[in-house]
Amino acid sequence: MTSGKIETQSTAAEVQRTGRNSLTVTDNRTGKTYELPITDDTIRALDLRHIKVNSEDFGMMSYDPAFNNTALCRSKITFIDGDAGILRYRGYPIEELAERSTYLETAYLILRGELPTKQQLAEWTYNVTHHTFVHESIKKFLDGFHYDAHPMGMLISAVAALSTFYPEARHIFDAESRQKQTWRLIGKMPTLAAFAYRHSLGMPYAYPDNELSYPGNFLNMLFKTTELKYKPNAALEHALDVLFILHADHEQNCSANAMRCVGSSQTDPYSSCAAATAALYGPLHGGANEEVLRMLLDIGSIANVPAYIKRVKAGEKKLMGFGHRIYKNYDPRARIIKRVSSEVFEVTGRNPLLDIALEVERIALEDEYFVTRKLYPNVDFYTGLIYQSMGFPVTMFPVLFAIPRTSGWIAQWEEMLLDAEQKIARPRQIYTGYEKRPYVPMEKRS
Ligand code: CMC
């Protein structure tokens, strides 16, 4: 029972008698009773508007800050059961995809709804691969950033700038145009990300190598120096591919919501994607992996873990990489990432921060504070350790999240565009400010 509300229970006989898939609500202000249809265990918020005190009344609304209990759309893309710790893309369990698929194949699945045939995959790979180059002016644009600019800020700006190179992208209801922008966005994100990284090092940009795999080419653009042909380490290339699969989509998270919201005003996909990337940047979303690493460095040693946990419980800090709006169980991605981390550490050597992370997890999973709140490690808890061992600076961590999430954003955006029920996103508010009052001249203000 929620606070201040009174639940009355129908008798089993009543339920049997009515047998209706509906919700009956009595407005105690008027004594009127309303029957609201239930579809998929959900009532339509607009049906509440029939509930009025009188004919002038605007009608009842629902108040749901941060969309805690509001379904924004019907979606066929990603399924999450947060209590059971289940994640599926288009029906396929994340564990199977991580084991058997590649990022590009998974991106195709997320966008098109089915796993590709051999020929479809070859064409898709060809098209994405042949859209990895960016206009030379992008390099000049990136050169304008300060040497220590955060690569995520550079990425957000560069993605937005792409819309100026492809003005036809605004024809969002043209399926062919959408297809082209999809290849471009998925193809160019790693290039923009790698260029941002090279800029921070003051190193010349390394161009894409179309003979390499998607993650292999990304490693090439990041780390190539004087060699004629860059050969990515197979284990690291595979680990990155798995991490990309795990980050490809996650239904209505903050950045997917930004993509849908901005896209709902019929903005071009590059500008919408820049908004989604900006949403991802925050420390409560894709910026959390960066914060986890900073936190582990701050803790400094296993001996300091209990004191740190104490401060978290006292409300002084958050345990970064823990907790999730949807998962009230172990994040299934975190489980896979833990396995991937050992594969990476075999190549790079064990990350010394791993022992601190394991101790944090051990203590937190036994502690009543975390147990009662169902706070478990999320996807970001171990990724930072892997990225750091692979040679990435912390500022690149959210960028590594944005690259694969692009396929999810585009799928969410396209689903929104083609959904006849969707319109421009425009929530309501409960106004709590002043009533009408007269303008106060300057000399009368205190
Ligand atoms: N450390 C300590 N306490 C926490 C944490 C945490 N990481 N997360 C939640 N809590 C507490 C919170 O203080 C609250 O306690 P109380 O009931 O006493 O007020 C309770 O748990 C419920 O938390 P909430 O803030 O209502 O949960 P939310 O659904 O609004 O927030 C979250 C979800 C992910 C923003 C939050 O758990 C958090 O800030 N975690 C740390 C940041 C993080 O790791 N983010 C990455 C999310 S996964 C990657 C992604 O998809 O972006």
Image (tube, rainbow, N blue to C red):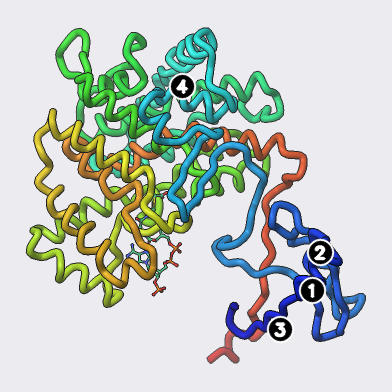
Q: Tag 2's secondary structure?
A: strand
- According to the picture, the residue beneath numbered tag 3 turns out to be 435
Question: Which residue is pictured at 43% across the width and 36% down the height?
Answer: 94
Give the Cα distance between marks 3 and 4: 57 Å
Mark carried by residue 105: 4
Q: Is residue 117 visible?
A: yes
Q: Looking at numbered disc 2 in the image, what kind of residue is underneath it? A: Leu
Counting from the top left corner in percent of width and height, residue 40 is at 70, 52
Which mark lies nearer to you, 3 or 4?
Answer: 4
Task: Tell me: 228 left or right of 207.
Answer: left
Q: Looking at numbered disc 3 in the image, what kind of residue is underneath it? A: Glu
Work out whether mark 1 precedes mark 3 in sequence or the reverse, and give the earlier one: 1
User: Is the Cβ of the residue at disc 2 closer than 8 Å to that at disc 1?
Assistant: yes
Q: Is residue 340 above or below residue 322?
A: above
Which mark lies nearer to you, 1 or 3?
Answer: 1
Work out whether mark 3 precedes mark 4 in sequence or the reverse, and give the earlier one: 4
Mark carried by residue 36: 2
Question: Which residue is pictured at 46% across the width and 26% down the height?
Answer: 106
Q: Looking at numbered disc 1 in the image, what kind of residue is underneath it? A: Val
